[in-house]
Image (cartoon, rainbow, N blue to C red):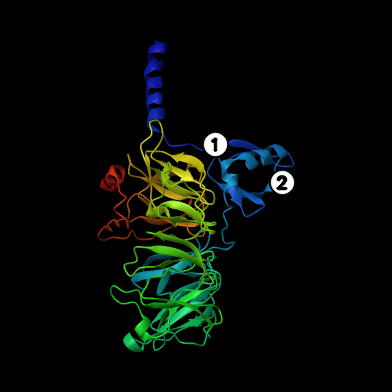
């Protein structure tokens, strides 16, 4: 009787194991220099001398590498995650949220801390979610109630009255420089402002792009502005406003890690790569040049380093689709150029070298790639969302109705339905929930920027949405 009773149970367990093909975490017993032990999973390096560990219960801890035993240090040194660039997170990160204010009877924007508490009481009308400068969330563009800039303590760096600039944008990722937009139409101009609102460069330009790598593209006159079908005349300037190089009737990209793509034809179908001095690094011509991150960019579906050398073979095993090219991590998702029996369709490559790291389960669809070391994924069978690590392991279970990429250690998710908005930390813990579920028309799924590379698998994934 016992044997007959156990058989169906064993079959059920085998079926469950076969159905769950997602890579699971590798737990290990870590020991510190005092002999204390914890069972956890190694997630990766935090900075140069700390490690992120995720305990069995899900709590994440950061410990000094030197406080772990020699055996643990050797294990970490050989772990695939240690070969990736360490994750750098702000020490006191804030995240912007929007919730219903019962007293005011309207939506209200504010910042929360790592514990989900309101960071400061300053009244904020609108938080420009892409308006964080410096990459460490030290400054934010807000309307509270007028347009201005706040620092991470909630203090106003500078404010703009209603009669001031109609627009304010974040500037460089490597310095707090903001773009103030004044006037309208042909009389409009921009000026680069410091964090206190004073001119960083006194020259007024007809238009301009954010500083990056101590360089910015500007239009010197109104006639230089891009028009329909034309790229305009973009002139490169440095921090002092010195004019460096001009590119007429062409499109240009913002610099990243000292490199930028510049179109060499009016249709912007052919590109080359230049450095901050305007010197040619790679002639191409290329169809598409991505952003340089961790020393490499995705160029025509392959990885290229800052010196213009290919890190992937021209007709190799992997192709990188455009939706993954700006993953802010030394790990990037790639698709196999052909089906290989016994291997998954997608995998993870080390961005800085092009070497293979791990497979991605065919049950999971990776949305936009890795941010803060995690990538949001959708289970194609359950249509629930979760997060994988850079080594392909499902770190945060696929239980959400929606999941956005992490930013500064936090991510916005939807719980049971897409209207139940919440914020989670890197351990997957919910630290904040909206008071009143948002009601309205479901958001339309965004079409992928590039359609010509879509295959049958990508079409099926979109239909699963």
Extreme residue in the top direction: 1
Q: Do the residues labelled 1 and 2 touch (CB within 8 Å)?
A: no
- Image-based side of 44 in relation to 161, left or right: right
From where the camera sits, is residue 144 visible? Answer: no
Query: 247 or 328: which is nearer to us?
Result: 247
What residue is drawn where x is 55% and y is 46%? 59
What residue is drawn where x is 43% and y is 56%? 299
Identify residue for label 1. 26
Q: In which quarter of the image is the N terminus?
A: top left
Residue 129 image offset from top left, x and y in percent = 42, 67
Snapshot quadrant of residue 446 = bottom left
Q: Which mark is residue 174?
A: none
Number of callouts:
2
Residue 311 image offset from top left, x and y in percent = 50, 49
Extreme residue in the right direction: 34
* Crowd tier of the residue under label 2, counting other residues whose Cα lies within 10 Å: few below 14, some 14–19, many 20 or above: some
From where the camera sits, is residue 363 visible? Answer: yes
Specify which label sits upstream in the sequence, 1 or 2: 1
Q: Residue 67 carries which label?
A: 2
Mark pair 1, 2: CA separation:
21 Å
Above or below, comparing residue 207 to residue 344 in the picture:
below
* Crowd tier of the residue under label 1, counting other residues whose Cα lies within 10 Å: few below 14, some 14–19, many 20 or above: few
Residue 141 image offset from top left, x and y in percent = 46, 74
Query: 458 or 252: which is nearer to us?
Result: 252
Residue 83 image offset from top left, x and y in percent = 59, 46
Snapshot quadrant of residue 89 = bottom right
Secondary element at image label 2 = helix
Secondary element at image label 1 = loop
Query: 22 or 155: which is nearer to us?
Result: 22
């Amino acid at each position: 009787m016992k044997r007959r009773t156990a058989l169906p149970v064993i079959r059920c367990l085998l079926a469950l194991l076969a159905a769950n093909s997602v890579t699971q975490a590798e737990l290990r017993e870590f020991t510190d220099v005092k002999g204390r032990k914890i069972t956890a999973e190694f997630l990766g390096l935090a900075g140069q001398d700390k490690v992120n560990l995720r305990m069995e219960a899900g709590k994440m801890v950061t410990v000094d590498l030197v406080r772990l035993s020699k055996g643990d240090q050797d294990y970490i040194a050989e772990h695939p995650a240690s070969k990736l660039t360490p994750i750098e997170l702000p020490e006191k990160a804030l995240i912007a949220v929007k919730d219903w204010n019962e007293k005011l009877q309207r939506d209200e924007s504010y910042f929360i801390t790592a514990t989900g508490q309101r960071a400061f009481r300053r009244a904020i009308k609108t938080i420009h979610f892409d308006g964080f400068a410096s990459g460490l969330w030290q400054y934010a563009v807000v309307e509270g109630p007028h347009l201005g800039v706040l620092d991470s303590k909630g203090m106003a760096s500078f404010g703009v009255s209603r009669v001031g600039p109609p627009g304010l944008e974040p500037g460089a990722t490597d310095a707090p420089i903001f773009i103030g937009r004044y006037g309208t139409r042909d009389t409009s101009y921009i000026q680069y402002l410091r964090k206190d609102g004073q001119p960083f460069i006194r020259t007024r330009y007809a238009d301009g792009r954010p500083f990056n790598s101590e360089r910015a593209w500007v239009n010197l006159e109104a006639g230089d502005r891009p028009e329909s079908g034309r790229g305009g005349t973009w002139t490169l300037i440095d921090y002092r406003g010195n004019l460096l190089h001009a590119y007429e009737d062409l499109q240009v990209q913002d610099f990243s890690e000292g490199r930028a793509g510049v179109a060499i034809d009016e249709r912007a179908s052919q590109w080359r790569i230049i450095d901050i001095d305007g010197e040619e690094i790679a002639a191409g011509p290329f169809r598409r040049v991505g952003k340089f991150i961790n020393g490499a960019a995705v160029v025509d579906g392959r990885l290229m380093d800052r010196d213009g050398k290919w890190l992937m073979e021209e007709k190799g095993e992997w192709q990188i689709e455009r939706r993954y090219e700006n993953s802010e991590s030394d790990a990037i998702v790639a698709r196999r150029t052909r089906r290989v029996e016994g291997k998954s369709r997608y995998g993870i490559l080390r961005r800085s070298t092009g070497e293979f790291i791990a497979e991605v389960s065919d049950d999971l669809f990776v949305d936009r790639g890795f941010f803060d070391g995690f990538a949001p994924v959708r289970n194609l069978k359950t249509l629930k969302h979760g997060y994988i690590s850079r080594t392909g392991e499902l770190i945060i279970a696929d239980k959400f109705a929606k999941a956005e990429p992490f930013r500064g250690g936090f991510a916005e998710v939807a719980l049971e339905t897409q209207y139940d908005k919440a914020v989670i930390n890197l351990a997957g813990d919910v630290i904040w929930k909206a008071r009143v579920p948002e009601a309205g028309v479901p958001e339309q799924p965004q079409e992928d920027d590039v359609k010509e590379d879509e295959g049958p698998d990508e079409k099926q994934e979109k239909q699963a949405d």
